[in-house]
Image (cartoon, grey):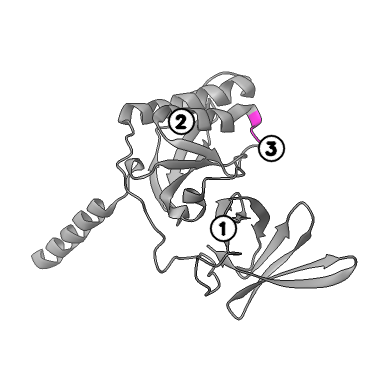
Amino acid sequence: MKKNILILFLFASLSALAQRSLNDYKYAIVPVKFNFTNEENEYRLNTITKFNLTKMGFEAFYDNENLPLEIATERCSRVFVNVEKVSSLMATKLVVVFRDCENKEINRSDIGSSKAKEYRLAYPEALNNAFKSLFTIGYNYNGKVYKAESKKAETPKSSVEPENTPNMLFAQPISNGYQLVDRTPKVVFKIFKTSHPDYFTVQSDTINGALIRKNNEWILEYYKDDKPVSEKLLIKF
């Protein structure tokens, strides 16, 4: 019995040592719309979030921005920031949540609240109050650079071609999917998740189509001049 308790204690200690912190990340990604809001940057919440992250010391970007190549080629070098609403009858309450590239929670703020009656006042006040706990903890990037694990749960597999292929596209997570950028980096397509992990809907300035994984290759299918077109894409997720 004592031996089992000791083993469990050792595993818990190792897990604690392996726990990532905000100081491990230089870049922070903010969505342009949070799940509980009705439109992009409603009540200026996304702007306020990015502003506070920059004030903390992060290099913060919206998830629809063209990112520096350093970020575009290694998505696990950044932390993904979300704001969540906490159910409450007496006040407006929000919490800031940080997750890694595998959607594992790294940290979260204390709950920020506001008793203002108007949402345009209550939401910003609650969000700024939530950030107060993060400023208290403090942030100082320690220089670490995380890379994607060889096995990632619930992450689509890329084609087998090497990363230095000239026409390789790099997947950057956005709300409900990814944006695919080239090496410049320029956003080429946005792909959105469906109920099937091997099927995405695709949008760009010129096409609407589908991205389908066939035989471990990603195939873009769309119509051009009323004729079906099928193209193979090389994608690094």
Residue that badge 3 annotates: 38
Query: Where, quadrant-wise, is the N terminus in this rendering?
Result: bottom left
Residue stretch in magenta: 38-42
Which of pointers 3 and 1 lies earlier in the amino acid sequence? 3
Task: Tell me which residue sits at (33%, 26%) in the image.
Answer: 136
Residue that badge 1 annotates: 171
- State which mark lies toward you, 3 or 1: 1
**What amino acid type should be assigned to the residue bearing mark 1?**
Ala
**What amino acid type should be assigned to the residue bearing mark 3?**
Asn
Residue 103 at least partly seen: no
The image shows residue 57 at horizontal and vertical percentages of 40, 31
**What amino acid type should be assigned to the residue bearing mark 2?**
Thr
The mark found on residue 54 in the picture is 2
Instruction: Please determine whether, in this image, residue 17 is positioned above or below residue 133.
Output: below
Report the Cα–Cα distance between label 3 and label 1.
26 Å
Q: Residues within 10 Å of mark 1 (few under 14, many from 20)?
A: many
Task: Tell me which residue sits at (40%, 35%) in the image.
Answer: 109
Q: Name the secondary structure under disc 3.
A: loop
